[in-house]
Amino acid sequence: MEFTRTTLLTAAIHGWRLAEHVRLLDENGTLALQLPELKALQGLEHNPIHHPEGGVWEHVLLCVEASESHDPVTNLAILFHDIGKGVTRTYGDDGRVHYYGHEAAGLPVFAGIAARVGFTRDERRAIEFAMEMHMVGHKLDQFSGRKLLPLRSHPDWLTLFHVVKADEKVRMHLWNEPAFTARMQRVEEIYVRVQAEQERESRLATFIDGRRIMETRPDLAGKEVGRVKEAIRRKIEARDYQVTPEEIAMWILAWPVTPGSQ
């Protein structure tokens, strides 16, 4: 069977087709020759508490089959998301298997695959982003808005979303679709709120900031400057941003001096 970037991308239009393609590559020996990093996942066990669906190899193929995406790069990201487990297996004192840091450890492993297959820069970026962040993706709703924003606004956010969903979806009785949906809705709510706050801050900063207040009123300092800024910003918003620099200067000059502000 021919093995090229084109054949991989063509097969990856559907998750089930990509899984079938990988199984055929394995059966005819091509997988061991061209993608030994994937072949190395065979026989790696999982802790059944977290992965009742089976070992690493079984998990990866089930994830690919469970994909709801028709984007080839996204489905390839699902295929490679756990590639780092091939180089991170350890055992605890209780005998349970662990793959600590497999998401970061998988990046140099995938770099070798990408160079060999000939993935483009954009394809590599999407796959590497999803690989590196897929563990974080399971707890995004616990993030503060400022930590969440760079992930949610990343150009490959949808790739990460589908990797995380497939990763959870195959875990049999552990999969809770309503909880997953609610979690991602919470992510969207946080994202929209923080984005709106940043847009507000950016727009208001063109009208008034601390430096302008202190230049106009050198007698003001510290927290008093902050109080002036917020008060004037509320006036600007109440006027729907229809204010002139002269009006803002008058508001600053009219601010009363309070004891301890100097």
Image (cartoon, grey):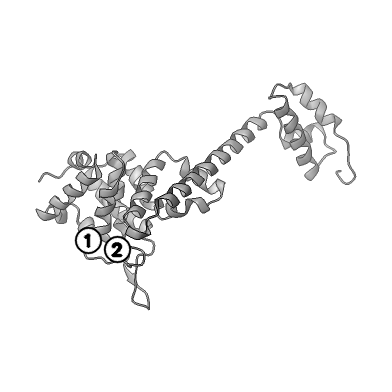
Check if mark 1's residue and mark 2's residue have beta carbons within 8 Å. Answer: yes
Residue 237, given in percent of the width and then of the height, sits at 70, 29
Q: Secondary structure at mark 1?
A: loop
Residue named by callout 1: 40
Numbered circle sitting on residue 87: 2
Residue 38, given in percent of the width and then of the height, sits at 23, 56
Q: Is residue 222 visible?
A: no
Crowd class of label 2 (few under 14; some 14 to 19; many from 20; radius 10 Å): some
Q: CA distance from mark 1 to mark 2?
A: 9 Å
Residue 230: name its quadrant: top right
Residue visible at 48% across and 44% down in the picture: 185
- The quarter of the picture where the C terminus appears is top right
Pick the front one: 154 or 21: 21
Pick the front one: 191 or 104: 191
Residue visible at 28% across and 45% down in the picture: 75
Type of residue at label 2?
Answer: Val
Residue found at the far bottom of this picture: 93
Residue 88: name its quadrant: bottom left
